[in-house]
Image: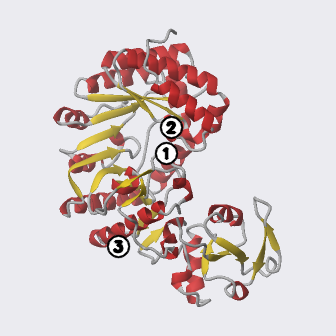
Amino acid sequence: MVNDRKKVILYGAGRNAGSAYTLLKEYLELVCFADQDEDKQGTELIMPDGRKIPVLTLVNAIELAEFIYVTIVPPLLYKVISDLINIHNIEERVIINNPYNEKFKYSVSPVLWSKLYSEKKAPSYRKSCQQVESQLIIGDKGIQACCSTDPSVFSWSKDASSQQLYNKLLGFKREVITAVSNDCIPYCKNCYALKEKEWGNNIESVESVSIGTGSICQFNCIYCKGINDQTKKDWETNIAERIERLNKDLDFIEYLKTVNYIHDNTEFFIVNGEITINPLRSRIYNIIKGYKCTFLTNAEVFSEEIADSMSNGESVVNVSLDAGTKESYATIKGKDCFNKVISNIEEYSKRGNIILKFIVMPGINTNDNDAKGFIDFAIKIGATVEISINFLDVQKFDRNIDICIDTIKKIAYNARANGLTVINRVEIAPNMRTENRKRINDALSFKGEAHDY
């Protein structure tokens, strides 16, 4: 835990004021807001918990606290911090979410709270998780601290060299580990993945690398429609920029091989949309050749490169099938290609291991025909079954928990009764009701006879 509660000013009394307050109040003593808007100065803001906090001038506010947290979000955040330092003569060290410089930036995140620790190093026996300790997640916004839907992100400009980036990456990892072990990242605090154990202090190698940059997909699935619409728009309007960024990330990955950060036993996860249509797929295939890989693909396009990777090692194809009928599949995916996908998955299964995912969506695939069709196909090809939910609409899942559990039981029971492995991805869903999480875990851990349809 943080050793003492520091007094902090929240700079910016605008629309992000309440969310910043909620994020920080448990850890820091928030004494006031400061704002340059004269109409706000001398007023009070009512916070979500009912507390009234005064809004002062910056001059008056800095007499009350040592640290400042800027509530404005990127990209304006960087200009505001620059003005605080260069115009208002605020020391860089007192700005908690200062992104350091223009070449390397951290997102607005408690990860920079390392400035508040009296103990700078995390002990080797600490609270942490596998993702934070030994996974490298590279996405369009930069390097993510973990798999959370709201992680800390470390980004960099295109003129940063791979060696500079590597040195900054190690510093970022140390800060994340320290922040997590001190319970200073709210979205990590109650995460299921946290374990208190001996983690050691070696951060100069990584067990897995997730490549998520340059996402593009030809499908328009229900559970990622909004995100996919935006990524398609980004590709259409910024093709050169997106390809340049992905090439930069791939350059960095190749550099990490030379310093043995990525080693022979590192596993790759290819999650940047649909790999089989990515413009840089040939370069990606070449970089990961010979490594154990998990390919997330919709399987509409069959890839000989993926098939070769499966044949030559321990690589896995993970397909989110989500249905057992062509009608439900078309509704969920926005494309009528169920039979083609089934045929390609069967071909992949001849080369190696398949993970078939079923994302439970109440009222869409929570019926006997989809459950039976899905599990019958999984049994036919000997697939591992992965059960998940739409993380962007947990509330709908909670509201329809009984029908969801019924479908999960039918799939899980029959999978295990036929010797298949079942993976529980529901347990990592954020904001699910505790009682429902327990019911799901109980249903997925049951080992018994096949369940009738």
Residue 37 appears at what percent x and percent y? 75, 79
- Residue at 29% of width from left, 47% of height from top? 268
Q: Is residue 13 above or below residue 237?
A: below
Q: Can you identify the residue that label 1 sits on?
A: 192
Give the residue at mark 3.
159
Assign a secondary structure to mark 3. loop
* Residue underneath mark 2: 427
The numbered disc on residue 139 is none
Circle nearer the N terminus (3, 1): 3
Residue 202's x, y, as percent?
A: 28, 62
Left or right of 442 in this view: 347: left
Is residue 127 depicted above or below 101 in this figure? above
Q: Kindly identify the residue that appears in the image at 60 percent across and 79 percent down.
A: 67
Contact? badges 2 and 1 (CB < 8 Å): yes
Q: Earlier in the sequence, mark 2 or mark 1?
A: 1
Q: How is the image coloured?
A: secondary structure
Q: Looking at the rendering, which quadrant does residue 257 occupy?
A: bottom left
- Residue 212 shows in the view: no
Locate residue 138: give its quadrant: bottom left
Task: Estimate the x, y position of residue 333 in percent, counting from the top left.
Answer: 50, 30
The 10 Å Cα crowd at callout 3, few under 14, some 14 to 19, many 20 or more, is: few
- Judged from the image, the secondary structure of the residue bearing numbered disc 2 is helix
Front one among 64 and 296: 64
Left or right placement of residue 63 versus residue 178 in this view: right
Q: Amino acid at mark 3?
A: Asp
Residue type indicated by callout 2 = Glu
Amino acid marked by disc 1: Tyr
Q: Is residue 391 visible?
A: yes
Q: Are marks 3 and 1 in contact (CB under 8 Å)?
A: no
